[in-house]
Amino acid sequence: MNGILGNRVASRRYSPAPVGARISAVARAAFAKRGFTEAHVLAQWPEIAGAQLAEYSSPEKLIFPRTSGEETGRGRRGGATLVVRVDGPIAVEIRHLEPQIIERINTWYGHSAVARLKLVQGPLPAKRRPRLRRLRPLTAGERAALAQELEKIEEPALKEALRKLGERVVGARAAR
């Protein structure tokens, strides 16, 4: 066939889209249902609210006010309410710090995205705890070798700290 392509054979290869692109699309849809067009507040909540407040609180959803398209124009929507789930009496402190938290969120977004916080009391989702490696007990020979290495150290607090470190390092190794 000597048509438009000439003698060349058109080859088509199928390559699947990267998994990250698909995960991003699914995550974007899930965040959008909760009002988070961008997941910055969720991902950066400990930096925005502070580590102590983030320990007992978690942003749940962002509720934008109902407005007609003429009022907002082409600019970004502002004046949203951020629903924050809180656990225990920390709600009083968050209510007290509400202006500072809103200011930090709006600084993070770069515009007046959030106008107020709505606090909902309830249990927070369980957080993943880091798994600690189980240590095997040291043998008598290993303890003796460690004690011999630490003999030269005169400072008692430093000696004790190094002994604990040595036990963890040696105990983490597989038994031979």
Image: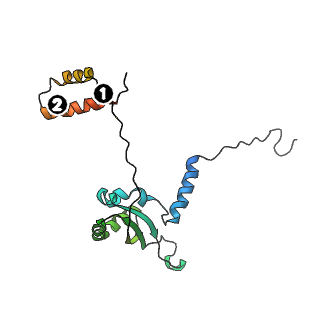
Of the pair 25 and 3, the residue shown nearer to us = 25
Please report the residue visible at 53 percent of the width from the left and 59 percent of the height from the top. Answer: 28
| Residue 92 in the image, given as x and y percentages of width and height | 28, 69
Reading the image, the residue beneath label 1 is 170
Q: Where is 39 relative to 82, above or below?
A: above
Inter-mark Cα distance, 2 to 1: 16 Å
Q: How is the image coloured?
A: rainbow
Q: Amino acid at mark 2?
A: Lys
Please report the residue visible at 19 percent of the width from the left and 21 percent of the height from the top. Answer: 148
Q: Crowdedness of circle 2 by 10 Å Cα count: few (<14), some, many (20+)?
A: some
Please report the residue visible at 29 percent of the width from the left and 66 percent of the height from the top. Answer: 89
Q: Quadrant of residue 143?
A: top left
Of the pair 26 and 132, the residue shown nearer to us = 132
Please report the residue visible at 74 percent of the width from the left and 43 percent of the height from the top. Answer: 12
**Contact, CB < 8 Å: mark 2 with mark 1?**
no
Residue 159: mark in rendering: 2
Q: Where is 13 relative to 98, above or below?
A: above
Secondary structure at badge 1 equals: helix
Q: Amino acid at mark 1?
A: Val
Tell whether 120 sits left or right of 27: left
| Residue 21 in the image, given as x and y percentages of width and height | 57, 50
Whichever of labels 2 and 1 marks the residue nearer the N terminus, that label is 2
Q: Quadrant of residue 16?
A: top right
Secondary structure at badge 2 equals: helix
